[in-house]
Image: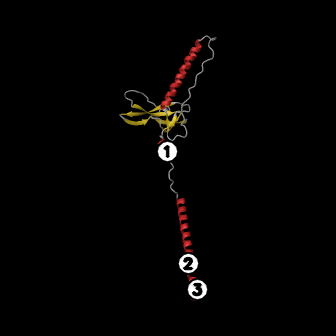
Amino acid sequence: MKAVPKVNEEGLYLEDTLVDDTFSGVVPFYSYMEQGIPDVLTTIGGVQGPKNESSNEPESNISGYIIGIPVTLGLFRPRFDLAAWNAYQSAVSAAQDSFQQALSDWRELPEEQRGDMPVLESTPQPTLWIEGLTLEEIEKLTKPQPEEPNEVDRLGSEMVTRELEALELRQQNEAQGAQIVGLELRLLSLENN
């Protein structure tokens, strides 16, 4: 078993889900509705889907997709580009059809006219996981928040403030003591006269 991403209908990441190790690609999962009221999601063999489309069965709606492609790291809110996936699948299918046609044409030629056997051209996979947030939303998320001082920082700051106040009081006390000594010396000199 392996964990793969699960996305909503718009391709936004919801959660991881467990699937068989051989799972790959993109598969829809369905929610079943009975009389317009959402019911539980139903899973069949690790891939969710409708059971039977008979008239007495509940109506099914695509709720999202199970994605067999790992999420690209570094995205704030990963979004799977379903349109790019569909275009990629169309390109892969077209390349395979073209290869099959070329191979069929090559096999129909006499051996002395064949030349090299056709090769299946691989279609490069586009970037399928993109950012689901706007630049403004990312800036808001990454903007540095003012830090609340913790208890130790707050107590340390208060202690420094109190020490500065005590130093100022000592300096005032020394200055007043020097004034008193000066006054006492004047008194003594007046008494001696």
Which disc number belongs to residue 189?
A: 3
| Screen quadrant of the C terminus | bottom right
Do residues under tags 3 and 2 come within 8 Å of each other at their CB atoms? no
Which disc number belongs to residue 139?
A: 1
Q: Earlier in the sequence, mark 1 or mark 2?
A: 1
Disc 1 residue type? Glu
In the displayed structure, 158 sits above or below 126; it is: below
At numbered mark 2, what does the secondary structure look like: helix, strand or loop?
helix
Q: Earlier in the sequence, mark 3 or mark 1?
A: 1
Which disc number belongs to residue 163?
A: none
Q: Residue furthest left?
A: 35
| Screen quadrant of the N terminus | top right
Residue occupying the point 55% across, 17% down:
101
Q: Residues within 10 Å of mark 3 (few under 14, many from 20)?
A: few
Disc 2 residue type? Gln
Disc 3 residue type? Ser
Residue behind mark 2:
179
